[in-house]
Amino acid sequence: MNANTKGTKITKITKKRTLLFVSFVVVVLAFTTPMVVRAQRSGQGLALSGGNALMYIGTYAGDVQIFDEATEKMVGQIKLATGIPRSLILSFDKKKFYVLDSTLEKVEIVDIASRKTLNQFTLSTGATKTRIRSMQVDPLERFMILLTRSATKKSDRWEISDVALQLYDLRSGKITRDIPWPGGEARENVNIRFSPDGKLLYFFGDDVLIVETENFTEVETWALSRPLEQGLGRVSFGAVDDINDEPGFFTGLFQMQDPIQNRRVMGIGRVNLVGKSIEFHPIGPSEGVGFAMTPDRKRGYGLLQQIGRYEFWAFDLEQKKLINRTEFAGRPRMALRVSSNGRLLYVFQAGATIDVYEAATYKYLRTIEMNADQTTNLFVLPRPAPTRN
């Protein structure tokens, strides 16, 4: 056998061994990759946990689904008597959800610990449909403030009422009064907040009108339309995170009009309702960024959503500055929530999944799978204390 023949045989053997090795690797990957993906998407073998809280979110299944933050698995649900939820409002003591249904006609009050319905009501009667456009719950849970509009079906038309601001008494279970519009000016939408003791109601507009909650008479005007300092524009509110803030405060990303450069400036803002004061710390040109805060209120995270461009932002809330901003592969319609220990970011909304990212690096970790599409905000709450028999 000459050298050329030997070289040809060696080359053929080497090629066969290479092909066999490649085929073996492909087969191994074919079997192992789905298992890795399944483990990653279902939360098995979590190397980095978000904490030991519970996650609550409303769905098209007509329930509030509950996930264990430590395992990222569904551990229960609150089945709603009123059907699909449109929004959840957390009570001041964080023990109840006030649920507005998808028709905007029914309100259901559920106990978080027992996962049971305590009460429900509707304002619609007969041929009149009354829709609740927004609602706020008194911190002492004596009453609710409802923004409503009614439509009555006649033989040949619908008769539409004016928008009304009404007080629903939670003890008697009925509307007990119409609340006069501050300044006599009705509004299609309203941004109102209670003082922590429930004695005052703040109506946010160009200025803040402060109303006492016994007779609902105006007691003071907080002139927000005035600049914080001479030469500055007025501050307007943007995205805030109420869940993790102190009572009587709210922190978020606010905007201010720069009258010299004629541009909008974005900054980290904090409002003290009782003290009637605003802090504003500029960080750059205004952009549409969502906001979520860690439970210790030391860090904030933002979510920028533009067509083909998605970014995470991080803020130092103690130093009042932007730390960084990083592009990532996002999805249309997203909302952001921070885990209970501040180590994970939950990206949710518009679907049946919650994507989990590491807060420190923005690295995608895994996806929590749900069995129904989401309809409400996501709440991350401490585990309820065990009930005593």
Image (cartoon, rainbow, N blue to C red):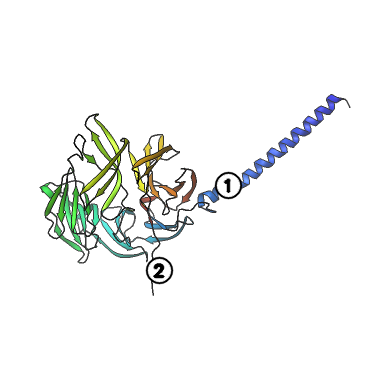
Secondary structure beneath label 1: helix
Residue 243: give x, y in percent of width and height. 33, 53
Residue 175: give x, y in percent of width and height. 17, 60
Secondary structure beneath label 2: loop
The quarter of the picture where the C terminus appears is bottom left
Q: Is residue 15 above or below residue 367?
A: above
Residue 229: give x, y in percent of width and height. 20, 38
Amino acid type shown at disc 2: Pro
Local packing at callout 1 (Cα closer than 10 Å; few below 14, some 14-19, many 20+) is: few
Q: Nearer the viewer, residue 336 or 350?
A: 336
Disc 2 to disc 1, C-alpha distance: 39 Å
Residue 368: give x, y in percent of width and height. 47, 51
Say which residue appears at 16% left-offset and 52% top-offset.
210
User: Which of the two labelled residues, at mark 2 and mark 1, occupies the earlier sequence position?
Assistant: 1
- Residue that numbered label 2 is attached to: 386
- Residue that numbered label 1 is attached to: 34
Amino acid type shown at disc 1: Pro
Nearer to us of marks 2 and 1 is 2
